[in-house]
Image (cartoon, helix red, strand yellow):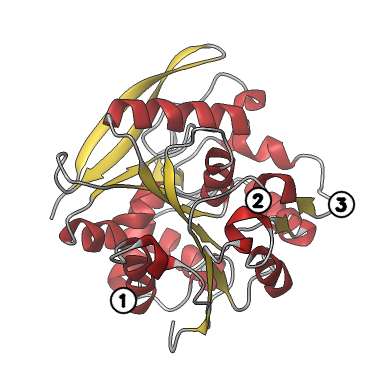
């Protein structure tokens, strides 16, 4: 199965910019799944998951957030804001011409998903938060910020892959082909013919000042009403088990038993969602026969990464 490479113009603070996305499955499918990546990643991280969900009959859309992948860079580092990401995703959903979407968000993609799900009249029907929740560790954000502020360059795809195998080890156990896939879609040629990461270095400016306190997002969580699946890497330094436990009990989704949680062993921040057992958890949640079957059945751990 091959994706369609598409794009949509988004009106931002400095005019229009191009938002790129990949589309899998039939455009006339009954359900649309939106997969949104982490802060320095891109939509091709979801290729393995997207193929599986498309084979179940879904239309799967994987955008490159502004400043990442094939999407345009924004005019100023200050333009990379939550509001800009929400505006881009709202424009994309309008382009897709659907009333509802199932949202799968990894890290920053989960944050944007929570923002969208908390809005009145939200199009988010169900939400998968991949290692993201209502309280985010300051230490993890300092780690991410320190990494993003470095200017990495690579002489070859093999060198980039070796680097990713080390830095993305918390993704869990991946096949050689999956590591190569991530490497090929993570870098692009620079002016000096060396390879650099496929994102705007300006996104690191959001981390210019080290984060000293945990980011608390309970005000968002307390507005989320849709069914939610929270995935947490057992070794995650971003999302604590205590936060996940509170999410299963708090807010309209938690109080009504609409929140399920799964811990993924052998992973930190964040599970890659490439392993068949991880994909099966997401598939079962999304394609349960009735909303009631998506509720109130927490799973402590899956058997393997």
Image quadrant in which you'd find residue 174: bottom left
Question: In the image, residue 8 lies at what x, y percent?
Answer: 32, 24
- Tell me whether the residue at label 3 lies in contact with that at label 2, contact meaning CB atoms closer than 8 angstroms: no
Looking at marks 3 and 2 on the same chain, the residue that comes earlier in the sequence is marked by 3
Q: Quadrant of the C terminus?
A: bottom left
Image quadrant in which you'd find residue 282: bottom left
Work out whether residue 193 or residue 72 is closer to the camera in this orientation and state it. 72
| For discs 3 and 1, the disc positioned in front in the rendered view | 1
Q: Residue furthest bottom?
A: 303
Which residue is pictured at 60% across the width and 45% down the height? Answer: 151
Using the numbered discs, state the Cα–Cα distance from disc 2 to disc 1 in whole angstroms: 29 Å
Looking at marks 3 and 1 on the same chain, the residue that comes earlier in the sequence is marked by 3
Q: State left or right for residue 45 relative to residue 269.
A: left
Which residue is pictured at 31% across the width and 76% down the height? Answer: 276
- Residue at the disc numbered 1: 276
Q: Quadrant of the N terminus?
A: bottom left
Mark 2 element type? helix
Question: In the image, residue 290 lies at what x, y percent?
Answer: 33, 63
Using the numbered discs, state the Cα–Cα distance from disc 3 to disc 2 in whole angstroms: 22 Å
- Residue at the disc numbered 3: 212
Question: In the image, residue 212 lies at what x, y percent?
Answer: 86, 52
Picture layout, residue 3 above or below residue 158:
above
Q: State left or right for residue 89 relative to residue 288.
A: right
> Mark number for residue 221?
2
Q: Residue furthest top?
A: 15
């Amino acid at each position: 199965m091959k994706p369609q490479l598409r794009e949509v113009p988004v009106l931002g603070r400095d005019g229009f910019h191009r938002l790129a996305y990949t589309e899998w499955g039939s455009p006339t499918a009954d359900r649309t799944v939106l997969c949104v990546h982490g802060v320095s990643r891109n939509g091709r991280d979801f290729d393995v998951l997207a193929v599986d969900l498309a084979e179940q009959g879904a239309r799967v859309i994987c955008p490159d957030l502004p400043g990442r992948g094939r999407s345009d860079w924004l005019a100023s580092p200050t333009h990379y804001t939550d509001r800009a990401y929400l505006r881009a995703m709202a424009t994309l959903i309008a382009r897709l011409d659907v009333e509802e979407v199932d949202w799968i968000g990894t890290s920053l993609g989960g944050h944007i998903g929570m923002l969208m799900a908390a809005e009145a009249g939200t199009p988010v029907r169900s939400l998968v938060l991949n290692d993201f929740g209502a309280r985010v560790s300051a230490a993890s954000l300092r780690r991410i910020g320190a990494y993003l502020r470095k200017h990495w360059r690579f002489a070859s795809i093999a060198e980039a892959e070796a680097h990713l195998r080390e830095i993305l080890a918390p993704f869990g156990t991946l096949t050689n082909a999956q590591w190569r896939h991530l490497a090929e879609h993570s870098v692009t040629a620079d002016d000096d013919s060396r390879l650099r990461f496929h994102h705007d270095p300006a996104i690191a400016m959001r981390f210019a000042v080290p984060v000293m306190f945990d980011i608390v997002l309970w005000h968002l969580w307390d507005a989320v009403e849709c069914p939610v699946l929270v995935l947490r890497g057992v070794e995650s330094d971003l999302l604590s088990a205590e936060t996940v436990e509170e999410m299963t009990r708090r807010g309209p989704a938690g109080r009504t038993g609409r929140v399920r949680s799964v811990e993924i062993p052998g992973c930190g921040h964040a599970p890659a969602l490439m392993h068949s057992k991880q994909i099966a958890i997401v598939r079962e949640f999304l394609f349960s026969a009735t909303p009631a079957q998506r509720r109130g059945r927490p799973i402590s751990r899956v058997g393997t990464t």
